[in-house]
């Protein structure tokens, strides 16, 4: 949708092509190197914390939205980014059906006290919103190509 919003025809195909070609991974590795990391790192090279907890769905439904801001707070409570083994792993995607008692996300931490804090925060924030039982459709709106403004926006200094 983002590609199409900026005028690229068949945006889904374009995104798929970029992923399949390896171009997206090369860009990711450039970013890792620019931030001082090892651009040759492999997923298996990254160790995760020994302490793990799951956030479970209290009801069945489809994932309507995920709050990135809440996930960042939860990961920080777990010790990320300082503790390299701390973080959050999503187990449910947007639009995906989740069963009652299904895992929504996993929290990893290097210290059990950090894990407990992060889990308590996750249970308070509810970073993943599920539809109610009777709600079947997930609606995504597209931003119109051009938004008409009667007055031009001017920034004065």
Image (cartoon, rainbow, N blue to C red):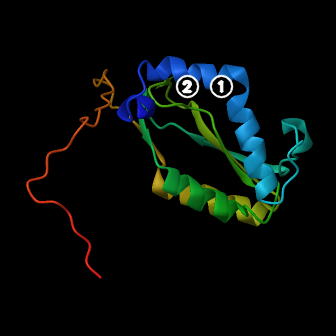
Identify the residue at image location x=70%, y=47%.
53
Screen quadrant of the N terminus: top left
The local secondary structure at tag 2 comes to helix
Rendered residue at 50%/56% (across/down): 69
Taking 96 as reference, is 152 above or below it?
below
Q: Which residue lies under the disc numbered 2?
A: 15
Q: Image height check: is 17 above or below 116?
A: above
* Front residue of this view, candidates 8 and 136: 8
Residue 142 coordinates in the image, percent (x, y) = 29, 32
Callouts 2 and 1 close, C-beta under 8 Å: yes
**Can you give x and y, in whole percent of width and height, for residue 114 in the image?**
72, 64
Residue at 39% of width from left, 28% of height from top?
4
Residue 13: percent from left, percent from top: 52, 17
Q: Position of residue 127 (x, y in %)?
A: 48, 49
Within 10 Å of disc 1 (Cα), the crowding (few <14, some 14-19, many 20+) is few
Q: Give the mark count.
A: 2
Residue 7 shown left or right of residue 82 in the figure: left
Give the residue number, with chain letter if any, for mark 1: 19
Outermost left residue: 150
């Amino acid at each position: 949708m983002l590609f199409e919003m900026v005028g690229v025809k068949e945006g889904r195909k374009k995104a798929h092509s970029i992923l399949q070609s390896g171009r997206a991974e090369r860009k990711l590795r450039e970013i890792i190197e620019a931030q001082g990391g090892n651009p040759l790192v492999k997923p298996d090279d990254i160790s995760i914390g020994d302490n793990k907890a799951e956030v479970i769905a209290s009801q069945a439904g489809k994932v309507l939205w995920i709050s990135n801001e809440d996930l960042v707070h939860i990961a920080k409570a777990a010790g990320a980014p300082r503790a390299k083994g701390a973080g959050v792993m999503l187990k449910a995607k947007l639009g995906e059906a989740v069963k009652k008692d299904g895992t929504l996300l996993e929290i990893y931490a290097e210290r059990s006290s950090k894990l407990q804090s992060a889990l308590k925060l996750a249970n308070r924030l509810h970073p993943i919103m599920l539809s109610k039982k009777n709600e079947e459709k997930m609606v995504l709106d597209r931003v119109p190509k051009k938004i008409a403004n009667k007055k031009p926006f001017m920034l004065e200094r």
